[in-house]
Image (tube, rainbow, N blue to C red):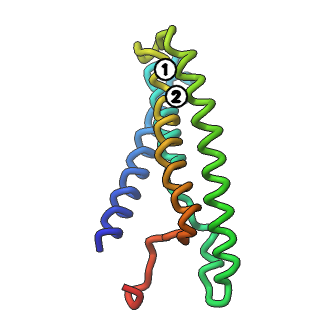
Amino acid sequence: MKKSRIINFLNTLMALCLAIMAGPVFINVVMRYCFSSGLAASEYRRLLFVWMVFMALTGLLHPLLEPGREAALKFATWLIHALVTLSCVLLGWGAWQQVIVGMGSVSVVLVCRQALLPLPAFLCSLAIGSMARLKLIQGRPIDFGHASPEAE
């Protein structure tokens, strides 16, 4: 029951992010076509997109949930955790470099330090990388959060 509330909250959050991103894009298209101008302050939609990318995508592994494919699911789980850990190391390293570079400049549109823009990627790489490494070490299978009522 608790997981379904979390999943519903995340789905609602993703839909809200999409709506917030789609509105300024539509307004910018109309303004550029009709008035030859645009909204500079709509740059936050890029940040929302970055946050949305960090949310889960598990649809490709659903065929491996069928009975008799436990070994393939276990290998896919190990491979995913290893690749996520490696990706987080690379993302964190690159994001930290961008944080350091951005310390000396200010965003013209958002009027804040440029170091704040890559900071979510750095923090997410630390959190996600730590969880993936722990699951890789423990050999814990991927939890899709879609357990059948009989399994609970």
SS at badge 2: loop
Q: Residue at x 61, y 32 (%)?
A: 93
Marks 2 and 1: CB-CB under 8 Å?
yes
User: In the figure, 114 relative to 131: above or below?
Assistant: above
Give coordinates of residue 6: x percent, y percent: 34, 62
Indicate which disc residue 118 carries: 2
Indicate which disc residue 75 carries: none
Looking at the rendering, which quadrant does residue 1 occupy? Answer: bottom left
Q: Residue at x 70, y 77 (%)?
A: 72
Give coordinates of residue 25: x percent, y percent: 51, 33
User: In the figure, 46 relative to 101: above or below?
Assistant: below
Label 2: few (<14), some (14–19) or many (≥20) C-alpha neighbours in 10 Å: many
Q: Nearer the viewer, residue 143 or 45?
A: 143
Asked if residue 25 can be seen in this view, the reply is no
Q: Nearer the viewer, residue 59 or 133?
A: 133
Q: Gap between marks 2 and 1, in whole Å?
A: 6 Å
Looking at the rendering, which quadrant does residue 94 occupy? Answer: top right
Q: Residue at x 47, y 10 (%)?
A: 106
Q: Residue at x 58, y 23 (%)?
A: 98
Give coordinates of residue 146: x percent, y percent: 45, 75
Q: Is residue 22 left or right of residue 137?
A: left
**Which three-letter amino acid code belongs to the residue tagged 1?**
Ala
Give coordinates of residue 36: x percent, y percent: 56, 16
Indicate which disc residue 115 carries: 1
